[in-house]
């Protein structure tokens, strides 16, 4: 498909900005609680031996330490509130007041069913930068898997939140079962003119740990879907794709829409956040490099030097193994796939992303160690 010059320029500029800002920010994702009322059939966070919610003082300690480190390093600092359902955290309103008082910008990944008028007003009042809600396809498909978060409620609460001045994004969770439904939904998504639309693959995580038929998209299926999104975006700007899946990078290069050559030789500049200055505080108060990689969890005491080292926990928990699939790929500094899905599917965090379509022998470049 031919691409307009303006479309190509917009994508190149978007990724150039991301690459430039990759090492200039610090983000702390906070898993406030494991509690959720939706009981989604594909939940990647479910099936844990432990359940509960994070201790407020422990969380505040992590937030202060990370914000302080960001100031020292001249980095921007942001917070993402997740769950379970973060709105079900027993001290949620108190936490919002705390973040506002400390001047910490935050985003919320939540559920439509707990996004009331009062809560939307409170989010706006305390400086929420935006909320992200999940969509699982057309109404029939969505309602069969999202519990209390019906499609009708998703649309109604999205419009209500926007009326309160909140930025709202939808995340498309995509697997074999709902792929066709998500495709049919694209015109409606474009008509919603959301602040952003992101996409993510359902993996063998949580409830789907042993359900390969439900979760496993083939590399070709995932590439075809991304390509369809890309073509639809050019024809329908209202879709507002933000190209968050790591495998957008090779696809956009293949389509002639992204030139990475000006950015090579500078170490890791984009891709899996396990290699960025980002971490997750889970409901136990433990630090992880990724909320979906349980093996990376570590308990960190509140000593300044320990906290500074914890900022780089992400890099230590899944560092690229020399000679591994991603280490020898031409896109190693800009992609690296999803390490959580890779670990869940293969048992090895260093393996090739299960939806990656790269032909490694063709795309190899001389191995260069990533910047620390």
Image (cartoon, rainbow, N blue to C red):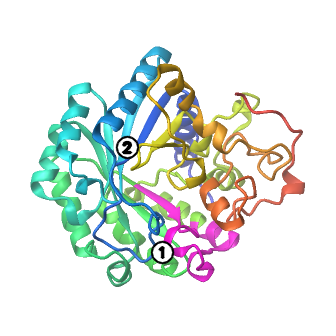
The numbered dot on residue 183 is: 1
Q: Which residues are magenta?
A: 197-225
Local packing at callout 2 (Cα closer than 10 Å; few below 14, some 14-19, many 20+) is some
Which residue shows up at 47% across the image and 17% down it?
74
Describe residue 120's horizontal placement relative to residue 250 as left or right: left
Residue farthest left in this picture:
118
Which residue shows up at 38% across the image and 34% down it?
78
Instruction: Judge whether 67 appears above or below 41 on screen.
Output: above
**Relative image position of residue 34 (x, y in whole percent):** 36, 59
Magenta stretch containing residue 202, yes or no?
Answer: yes
- The quarter of the displayed image where residue 45 is located: bottom left
Magenta stretch containing residue 211, yes or no?
Answer: yes
Describe residue 195's horizontal placement relative to residue 357 as left or right: left
**Relative image position of residue 288 (x, y in whole percent):** 53, 44
Which residue shows up at 53% across the image and 30% down it?
21
- The quarter of the displayed image where residue 258 is located: top right
Describe residue 248's horizontal placement relative to residue 35 as left or right: right
**Relative image position of residue 294 (x, y in whole percent):** 55, 54
Which residue shows up at 66% across the image and 53% down it?
337
Asked if residue 101 can be seen in this view, the reply is: yes
Quadrant (top left, top right, bottom left, bottom right) of the C terminus: top right
Quadrant (top left, top right, bottom left, bottom right) of the N terminus: bottom right
The residue carrying mark 2 is 80
User: Marks 1 and 2: which is nearer the front?
Assistant: 2
């Amino acid at each position: 498909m031919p691409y307009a010059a303006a479309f190509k320029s917009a994508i190149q500029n978007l990724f150039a900005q991301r690459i430039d800002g990759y090492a200039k920010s610090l983000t702390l994702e906070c898993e406030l609680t494991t509690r959720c009322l939706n009981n989604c059939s594909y939940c990647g966070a479910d099936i844990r031996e432990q359940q509960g919610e994070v201790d407020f003082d422990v969380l505040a300690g992590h937030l202060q330490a990370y914000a302080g480190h960001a100031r020292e390093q001249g980095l921007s600092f942001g917070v993402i509130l997740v769950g379970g359902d973060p709105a079900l955290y027993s001290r949620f309103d108190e936490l919002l007041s705390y973040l506002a008082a400390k001047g910490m910008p935050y985003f919320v990944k939540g559920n439509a069913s707990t996004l009331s008028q009062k809560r939307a007003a409170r989010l706006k009042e305390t400086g929420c930068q935006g909320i992200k809600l999940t969509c699982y396809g057309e109404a029939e498909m969505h309602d069969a898997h999202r519990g209390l978060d019906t499609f009708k409620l998703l649309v109604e609460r999205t419009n209500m939140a926007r009326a309160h001045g909140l930025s709202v994004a939808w995340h498309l969770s995509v697997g074999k079962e709902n792929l066709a439904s998500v495709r049919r939904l694209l015109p409606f998504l474009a008509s919603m003119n959301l602040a952003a639309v992101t996409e993510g693959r359902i993996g063998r995580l949580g409830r789907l740990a042993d359900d390969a038929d439900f979760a496993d998209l083939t590399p070709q299926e995932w590439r075809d879907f991304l390509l369809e999104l890309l073509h639809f975006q050019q024809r329908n700007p209202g879709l507002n794709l933000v190209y968050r899946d790591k495998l957008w990078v090779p696809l956009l290069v293949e389509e002639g829409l992204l030139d990475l050559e000006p950015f090579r030789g500078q170490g890791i500049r984009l891709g899996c956040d396990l290699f960025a200055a980002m971490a997750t505080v889970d409901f136990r108060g433990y630090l992880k490099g990724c909320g979906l990689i349980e093996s990376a969890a570590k308990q960190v005491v509140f000593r300044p030097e320990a906290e500074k080292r914890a900022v780089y926990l992400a890099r230590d928990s899944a560092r690229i193994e020399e000679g591994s699939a991603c280490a020898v790929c031409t896109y190693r500094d800009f992609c690296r796939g999803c390490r959580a899905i890779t670990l869940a599917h293969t048992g090895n965090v260093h393996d090739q992303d299960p939806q990656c379509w790269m032909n490694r022998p063709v795309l190899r470049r001389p191995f260069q160690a990533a910047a620390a």
